[in-house]
Amino acid sequence: MNMVQERLPDAQSHELLFQQMVPPPKEFNPGPEYEMEKKVTQYIWKKGSYRCGITAHIIFFLLSPGFVQRAAQAKPLRFGNLIKFALSFDFTDVFIKRVTASGRGKASGNGLEDADIRKMLVSIQKAHDVIGIPHIEMVHFGYRLLQQLESDIGGLSPKAKEYHLRYMCHVYHTMGLPFSTDRQLLENFCAEIEAQFSEFTAISAPYTQRLLFLGLTVGVPCNKEILRELLPKNINVIFDCHYDEMRPSMPWIVTGKLLNFLLYPRRRFRNPQPSASEKAFIATLN
């Protein structure tokens, strides 16, 4: 069954909000509070779990036309093949940790002041441009990812969230995307898209089954209530209705939990937790 959420009276309203985003600057010039923004962002990406990545993808998989269907047409195996999906998920994990200076080992990095990391961000966006992914969809996913992370952690002060958003705005600007530090603008933009485009399609179920299996391998339970806590209203309506179709079968759930146990040491090495001094620093922002 296809289930389409209420449509916006003005089908172009999300585009009008998108036009209010700030275009990327010609040069990387983050400003005097960059180190504070980076320090807060580093803490947040260390503190958060993989739940935000799972729920951000759930949102994406329940948006159509365009969005997930466009990605499926451009790169059929990225989400359509479990191994390809796992490699893509792992690559994204590594580059985000390098960008936010929150990882270790091959996921270690110095943040945006590193010219190589900025070049990597540019190349990633160029790859999306080549296959025709609109910037409007990139911005939606980008904001939802950082917002889902903040919600996953909970208890962040408005000041910490402000610094985090400003750093991530530098990230998306470096990629070549318009973005904003106006959180309400971004919230309205995402809500408009979700109100207009949220829909369960033929590829939503198999894609989400693979996603939730991968979530299990990184410690994210495929528990309906745990996941829906983070999902926005229009997405939750569809998620509630179709969850049984989207969850993996029991053999896959057991396999995912086993892989989580086996991969845990590797994951903990890659993902250091915030230190006592980092926790104390964040507490000063409350």
Image: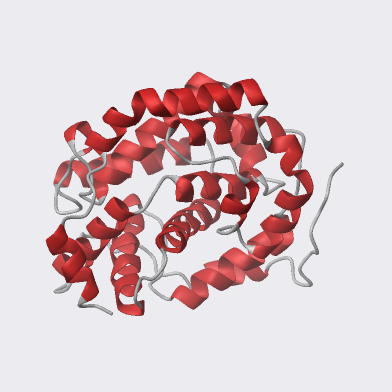
Reply above or below: 174 against 158: above
Q: Is residue 142 left or right of residue 283?
A: right
Residue 271 x %, y %? 26, 41
Q: Quadrant of residue 266?
A: top left
Reply above or below: 231 against 55: below
- 68, 200: nearer the viewer: 200
Residue 285 x %, y %? 24, 78
Which quarter shows the N terminus? top right
Residue 6 x %, y %? 80, 64
Residue at point 34%, 63% (across, down):
169
Viewer can see residue 30: no
Which quarter shows the C terminus? bottom left
Reply above or below: 251 against 126: above
Q: Is residue 282 left or right of residue 232?
A: left
> What sort of colour scheme is used for the picture?
secondary structure
Residue at point 51%, 26% (across, down):
256
Residue at point 42%, 29% (across, down):
260
Q: Quadrant of residue 208?
A: top right
Viewer can see residue 57: yes
Residue 122 x %, y %? 31, 44
Q: Is residue 188 left or right of residue 157?
A: right
